[in-house]
Image (cartoon, helix red, strand yellow):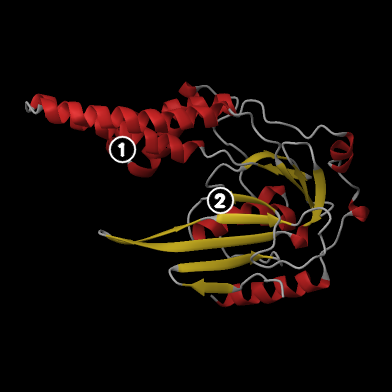
Amino acid sequence: MTSRAGEIKKYFFLKQEHLSPLPIPTGQPASDILGLMWRKTDTCLDIGSLPLAGAWMTNHCLTVIFLSVVTYALVTGMYIGAFMVLVFGVLLMGFSWTLFVRLYRRPLAPPLRFHRHRREARITTPDGDEWVVPWERVHAIAPSATMIGQFGAAQMGGLILWFPYKNEIDQPYHKDKEGWLMMVSPGPGIAAMRQWECIRSFMESGSESVPEPLKNIRGKSLKDIFHEEFKKAREKRGLLLALLWDVGIGCGLFNVMTYHWLHKRKFAVIPELESPEAVAWSQPLPPEQWAKRSPELEAAIAEREQDLAKL
């Protein structure tokens, strides 16, 4: 039997929570943690995944750490140690930065498009194959795992969007069932729910209920981005902490402005769905032709809202 929203399956150090179907409210606010939202209109939402932020922060911070260790070793006269750390750092970070550059230079894949009037999702593969999946057949799964190490336990997790292949739309889902999927890593539990809620809220409540896509990035200069972010930080934390944390740590240590520049250039032109079928499918419909929720979803949402009201 296919899994349903609210089901939680627990294994050894592993938990798998089903968020859809049926796409009922999670109780969390919509938050585009990973910048998956590429384009939004009143009719359609385009999402895609290119994990630049995590790769950039990891590579940049490790590079800073290696350079700091090498500098300390040179200052204290440990020249052999400095040489060994430098060689190891060049090999490790050279490989890691090479992977990042290849990822960055890879063309953006076609987005996954959700049409709220039709209550459907359109999948377009890089090979040009296309098909449509009913909204209430989309599976959202939030797996999480507990990792045990010498410093204690840490939890890791993500969000999986699973779609049946075009010739298997009505076949039931199970854990070994093959399908087209998108896997992202916003984090476990609440973080995955907030990322999923961006899609669910758009489809069930409208475009006003979700954040603007790629906000503060496209169409703005780095100077404008810095001024806006610094103004928000100053109002939230005060001038001294804003200078120390956001300018000193953020711009100095993490080099976020270079990341913003790379991000802006990469997403300056987001791919469109260009096939005649996709263009026709993406058009808005008059309100009288909008697809309706199934009775099962209506009942499930009503029950879920009652549960959330009691919290």
Instruction: List the residue tagged with mark 2.
Output: 31
Cβ atoms at labels 1 and 2 below 8 Å apart: no
Q: Classify residue 74 by image quadrant.
A: top left
| Residue under the image location 63 percent in, 65 percent down | 19
Expressed as whole percent of the image width and height from the top left, the position of residue 126 reads 72, 36
Instruction: Give left or right: position of 12 versus 167.
Output: left
SS category of the residue bearing label 1: helix
Query: How far apart are the alpha carbons under marks 1 and 2?
Result: 23 Å
One can see residue 256 in this view: no
Count of picture labels: 2
Expressed as whole percent of the image width and height from the top left, the position of residue 286 reads 91, 48
Question: Label 2 is placed on what type of residue?
Answer: Ser
Q: Classify residue 22 by image quadrant.
A: bottom right
Question: Label 1 is placed on what type of residue?
Answer: Trp
Vertical placement of 50 versus 67: above or below?
below
Vertical placement of 214 versus 304: above or below?
above
Q: Nearer the viewer, residue 203 or 232?
A: 203
Q: Nearer the viewer, residue 91 or 27?
A: 91
As drawn, the residue found furthest toward the left would be 77
Vertical placement of 143 versus 213: above or below?
below
Name the disc covering residue 48, or none: none
| Residue under the image location 40 percent in, 37 percent down | 57
Quadrant of the image for the N terminus?
A: bottom right
SS category of the residue bearing label 2: loop
**Circle 1 residues within 10 Å: few <14, some 14–19, many ≥20:** some
Instruction: Give left or right: position of 105 versus 24.
Output: left
Expressed as whole percent of the image width and height from the top left, the position of residue 224 reads 49, 24
Vertical placement of 302 versus 102: above or below?
below
**Circle 2 residues within 10 Å: few <14, some 14–19, many ≥20:** some
Instruction: Give left or right: position of 27 versus 253.
Output: right
Instruction: List the residue tagged with mark 1.
Output: 245
| Residue under the image location 57 percent in, 53 percent down | 195
